[in-house]
Image (cartoon, rainbow, N blue to C red):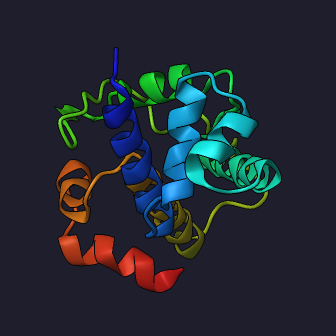
Amino acid sequence: MMRVQEILQFIDDAVYAKTRKRLNDLQRGIIEGTLKRQKYDDIAENCGCSAGHAKDVGYELLQMLSDIFDEEVDKKNLKSVVERQSNLNISLGARSFNSNNNIIGCVNMGSEQTTPTPDESQPETPDLQEESKNQTKIETIDKLRQFGLSDEQIAEALDIPLEQVKQVDLEE
């Protein structure tokens, strides 16, 4: 079971990986208060703001975390979502790795993608195949960044040059 400070660090790292911004004091206070099952009135009092402001920021924060973790996050399930996400293991082929001392286990990165059946009347051209491969690679790199992996770790896991991973930022 993760402690509050570990959860705050994990969420801060996940938010940074997605947005390149760190949590502010109010966001950290909202997370901490939520983990302690506090109401927004109590969280606001501890953070020195109005309950309405804390609730608005809390709503935005939970929506952002839902985006980052790709599952619904609310005040009631925040802790379980974070614990589950921190224990995900990313395994690509024979490689698996550990990021920031968080255990990362087996996730099939292609599980959400269906394999299209090629249309016999319109065979794919090499250009379309290459474009499809590049798009898949970009999506995989973005997903791995959301899990908090560094560009170096991603390059090693995907067995591609570091420059190619860094290029994905430039293409977006």
In the rendered image, which quarter contains the N terminus? top left
Q: Is residue 86 visible?
A: yes
- x then y, percent, for residue 82: 48, 29
Residue lying furthest bottom: 170
Q: Is residue 144 visible?
A: no
Q: Is residue 60 left or right of residue 24?
A: right
Comparing 52 with 71, the one in front is: 52
Q: In the displayed structure, would residue 114 be above or below residue 143?
A: above
- x then y, percent, for residue 36: 54, 23
Q: Residue at 22% across / 42% down in the picture?
A: 99
Q: Is residue 4 left or right of residue 110?
A: left
Q: Residue at 68% across / 21% down in the picture?
A: 76
Q: In the displayed structure, would residue 158 be above or below residue 85?
A: below
Q: Is residue 97 left or right of residue 31?
A: left
- x then y, percent, for residue 74: 70, 31
Q: Residue at 20% across / 54% down in the picture?
A: 153
Residue lying furthest right: 52
Comparing 28 with 108, the one in front is: 28
Q: Residue at 44% across / 44% down in the picture?
A: 11
Q: Is residue 71 left or right of residue 87?
A: right
The part of the image, by quadrant, that contains residue 128 is bottom right
Comparing 103 with 41, the one in front is: 41
- x then y, percent, for residue 39: 72, 30
